Amino acid sequence: MLPSGSSIDLAGNTDLWAPDAQIVNGVYHVYYSVSTFGVQDSALGLATSATMELGSWTDHGATGIASSSGKAYNAIDGNLLNDSGTYYMTFGSFWQDIFQAPMNSAATKVASSSYNLAFDPSGTHAVEGPYLYKYGSYYYLFYSAGICCGYDTSRPASGAEYKIKVCRSTSPTSGFVDATGTACTNGGGTVVLESHGTVYGPGGQGVFTDPTLGPVLYYHYVDTTVGYADGQKLFGWNQIDFSSGWPVV
């Protein structure tokens, strides 16, 4: 997308992470993360293209969402929600977990300060990769919880590996709870997809609406018959059934 990297002056600006692709006013917008693993010197950037073709991307640099040591959040893993023309950026990884900030009307720059949507007070606060999706009258906050990576060299305790969880709210900006009613800001989260059979550590998810299949959850995972290294991870997807009011795959 940006072979020369980002104009954002941070370490990692030639190795961009966690792209979130959206269409804004007929133009493809990709929000990317600039960071290095495990630090808070991070920022969310933006590139746009009319076609998504190789060589067609324009880098717009910083969105204004950034973090440094001592901040409550880590400014990576951005996801843009278009709520009837009002734009929100949801983001975060570890520290105090998932935050959100309103964006301007062009969805290019942050418009005001951020606030917390989800926090696991236990352990290392291993929550990241939010994706906000509206279905019916609810906004569903999907996120990844647990240890994401390095399974080939250090396997986490059973159940501590990546999994996909969800909370929901009738508002896109607050009030997210899990299926038991526990607040997402107090450790709430209902499991949508976790390790099973030869599928291990699913996460890094997003959701889109397919014209034939309806809502689809996509993610990366380890196939234990292939290998546990990060470079061996595969792409997976499942249709989502919302008939109960909660996503089931």
Image (cartoon, rainbow, N blue to C red):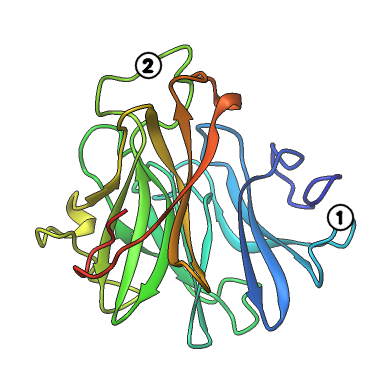
Residue type (three-letter) at the residue carrying disc 1: Leu
Residue at 14% of width from left, 60% of height from top?
Answer: 179
Please give the label number shown on residue 79.
none
Report the side of 235 relative to 27 (left or right).
left
Compare marks 1 and 2 and give the one earlier in the sequence. Answer: 1
Q: Nearer the viewer, residue 202 or 144?
A: 202
Decide if residue 12 is on the left or right side of residue 82: right
Which residue does the image show at 76% across and 67% down from the upper left? 48
Residue picked out by circle 1: 54
Query: What's the distance in space between the residues labelled 1 and 2, CA to CA?
Result: 37 Å
Circle 1 SS class: loop
In the drawing, what numbered circle is on residue 155? 2
Q: Residues within 10 Å of mark 1 (few under 14, many from 20)?
A: few
- From this viewpoint, which residue is outermost toward the right? 55
Quarter of the image for residue 130 reads bottom left
Task: Please state which amino acid type lies under the numbered disc 2.
Answer: Arg
Q: Nearer the viewer, residue 229 or 115?
A: 229
249 over 38 or under it: above or below: below
